[in-house]
């Protein structure tokens, strides 16, 4: 039925009024935001909560605050808060409220480094935990004092690496995964084609656990003034309640949080009648680094590359999605930073276990171009392996933490064959083709011997003609030298530095410092960190149209998150392979590696 003229007029008038009201609300909110000045009382205690997913980077956006779409706290944001608090004379101390978080061991090392740097100011750092697992306690040992409530628990029970396998389930469904790989340690597809660890992966995981465990013991021993043998005995007899942890001198007090506040009041010289002036991270975020004399000077571009490597646009994880590294987004950002004469160096922050080999190579190519213009330094987060290492390998310098997961220089091609599932469901397929290999990637038939050789040659080509030579050129080594430490093997940052795959230990701050030095900027002056690409405004990102792959990935994540936790791993692994084209060459880390 056609709309009447009166109805149309009312609809138009209503839309105009609604738009005007919305614009007015936004305008008032923006004005209030601009006029509001952050209040930081003297001798404040900055409270930083370590919890949640803590992505590497989450852009600030006033509009996001207004509409309740503020992003999660980011790891780089915590580092910025510490840098500010170090020089801010109004901040007297920092209290870390540590919960179970999503950071890995690499970021745990980086956070400990940042705490150590803050402590050079002479200001105290306290840590409070209701429960302290291995990683939480590892971070807390960087503080001056550690507290648990009397009913809290310290669960430093030692490390374990878990690898989950799905072949048994796939066999029941009549699904078989066929794959080829280059590198005897390249086991990214093992969970889909095996029921247990291969000897090569068992070797790698044992070596990594030895490395992590050794440093965990030495770190606790140094922090708590114990021998390594004492720490081993303590771990072997864990867990402990808070009172037992205090008796073992693993913590400084089994007290409640309000009693921790009293401790801080005494430490900072408060009067008994005064309340402790607590400063939340959200409020302190309003204090700009520039107002404290930080983040000023010559510009250094910081490009964050976090998540699965894919073609197309990156996703920042907003609105329920997962973070991805899109080659189009990174290529554009690198090119803009390289061509911007005001930018003196580029720092690429990588936190990725890899993905598409093609997308990795496109980013590598643009980074190679950028290196002809100015220094390019890579900072590795928790993980920079396989495709994540590919895009880092040609940097002027590579910086990683000792616990960073890196390497995995190898290639796989994999695809499911679901003929058995079709048979079980009573589904039949008939194909009419032209061309000998027209059915190479059909899912109803396995590859024959000739097809396997063809697919293997594709993997060999990428490994021997691209990946290994490019790493060798970037690291100033021969192809043979790189092959000896490649073959898909995963290394810790400590092991990688010994083998010449990493140059320096440190985090993002260290990488910025090295980039400044390589650009011949004054060592006694700060630099301005500029994020490329510029953060997308909240409303723009809200109303922008996502590509089909991003929408699909978001839907898959929503479905997977609704499943039981153990089942999530199965479907998350399958969803990874579903992101890529049939027959696409992949540079991906073995397993969803988890050491806890």
Image (cartoon, grey):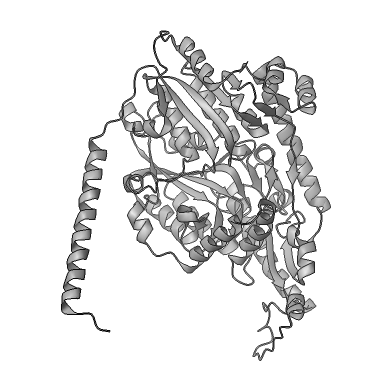
| 336 shown above or below 253 | below
Of 329 and 213, nearer the camera is 213
Q: Is residue 34 visible?
A: yes
Quadrant placement of the C terminus: top right
Of 103 and 554, nearer the camera is 554
Q: Position of residue 318 (x, y in %)?
A: 45, 53
The picture quadrant where one finds residue 329 is bottom left
Q: Position of residue 398 (x, y in %)?
A: 56, 42
In the image, is 518 to the left or to the right of 485?
A: left
In the image, is 568 to the left or to the right of 69?
A: right
In the image, is 16 to the left or to the right of 477?
A: left
| 185 shown above or below 173 | above
Of 327 and 409, nearer the camera is 327
**Residue beneath the point at 46% across and 13% down:** 265
| 19 shown above or below 274 | below
Q: Position of residue 404 (x, y in %)?
A: 63, 40
Q: Position of residue 431 (x, y in %)?
A: 67, 89
Counting every numbered tag in the picture gives: 0
**Residue beneath the point at 64% across and 34% down:** 135
**Residue beneath the point at 42% across and 49% down:** 373
Quadrant placement of the N terminus: bottom left
Q: Is residue 505 visible?
A: no
In the image, is 160 to the left or to the right of 502?
A: right
């Amino acid at each position: 039925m056609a709309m009447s003229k009166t109805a149309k007029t009312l609809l138009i008038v209503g839309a105009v009024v609604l738009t005007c009201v919305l614009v007015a609300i936004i305008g008032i909110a923006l004005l209030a935001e601009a006029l509001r000045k952050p209040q930081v009382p003297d001798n404040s205690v900055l409270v930083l909560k370590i919890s949640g997913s803590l992505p590497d980077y989450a852009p600030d956006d006033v509009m996001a605050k207004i509409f309740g779409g503020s992003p999660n706290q980011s790891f780089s944001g915590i580092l910025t808060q510490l840098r500010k608090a170090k020089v801010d004379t109004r901040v007297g101390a920092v209290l870390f409220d540590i919960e179970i978080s999503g950071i890995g061991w690499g970021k745990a090392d980086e956070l400990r480094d940042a705490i150590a740097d803050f402590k050079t100011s002479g200001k105290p750092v306290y840590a409070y935990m209701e429960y302290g697992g291995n990683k939480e306690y590892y971070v807390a040992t960087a503080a001056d004092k550690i507290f648990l409530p009397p009913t809290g628990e310290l669960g430093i029970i030692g490390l374990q690496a878990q690898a989950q396998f799905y072949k048994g389930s796939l066999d029941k469904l009549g699904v078989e995964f066929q794959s080829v790989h280059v590198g005897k340690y390249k086991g990214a597809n093992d969970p889909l084609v095996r029921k247990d660890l291969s000897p090569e992966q068992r070797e790698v995981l044992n070596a990594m656990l030895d490395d992590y465990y050794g440093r965990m013991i030495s770190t606790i021993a140094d922090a708590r003034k114990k021998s390594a043998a004492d720490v081993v005995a303590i771990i072997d007899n864990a867990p402990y309640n808070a009172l037992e942890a205090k008796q073992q001198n693993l913590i400084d007090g089994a007290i409640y949080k309000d009693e921790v506040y009293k401790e801080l009041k005494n430490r900072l010289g408060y009067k008994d009648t005064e309340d402790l002036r607590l400063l939340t991270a959200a409020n302190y975020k309003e204090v700009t680094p520039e107002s404290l004399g930080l983040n000023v000077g010559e510009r250094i571009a910081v490009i964050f590359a976090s998540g699965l490597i894919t073609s197309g646009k990156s996703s920042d994880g907003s609105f329920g999605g997962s973070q991805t590294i899109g080659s189009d987004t990174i290529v554009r950002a690198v090119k803009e930073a390289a061509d911007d004469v005001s930018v003196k160096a580029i720092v690429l922050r990588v936190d990725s276990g890899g993905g598409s080999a093609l997308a990795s190579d496109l980013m590598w190519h643009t980074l190679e171009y950028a290196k002809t213009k100015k220094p390019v330094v890579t900072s590795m987060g928790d993980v920079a392996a396989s495709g994540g290492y590919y895009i880092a390998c040609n940097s002027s310098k590579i910086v990683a933490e000792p616990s960073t997961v890196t390497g995995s220089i190898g290639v796989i091609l994999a695809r499911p064959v679901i003929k058995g599932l079709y048979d079980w469901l009573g589904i039949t397929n008939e194909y009419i083709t032209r061309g000998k290999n027209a059915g190479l990637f059909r899912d109803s038939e396995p590859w024959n011997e000739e097809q396997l050789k063809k697919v293997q040659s594709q993997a060999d080509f990428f490994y021997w003609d691209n990946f290994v030579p490019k790493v060798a050129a970037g690291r100033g080594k021969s192809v043979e030298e790189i092959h000896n430490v490649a073959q898909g093997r995963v290394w810790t940052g400590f092991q990688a530095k010994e083998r010449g795959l990493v140059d320096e230990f440190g985090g993002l701050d260290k990488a910025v410092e090295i980039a400044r030095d390589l650009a011949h900027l004054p060592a006694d002056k700060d630099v301005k960190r500029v994020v490329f690409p510029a953060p997308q405004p909240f409303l723009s990102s809200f109303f922008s149209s996502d590509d089909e792959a991003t929408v699909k990935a978001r839907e898959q994540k929503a479905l997977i998150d609704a499943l039981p936790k153990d089942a999530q791993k199965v479907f998350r692994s399958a969803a990874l392979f579903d992101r890529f084209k049939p027959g696409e060459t992949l540079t991906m880390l073995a397993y969803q590696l988890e050491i806890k």
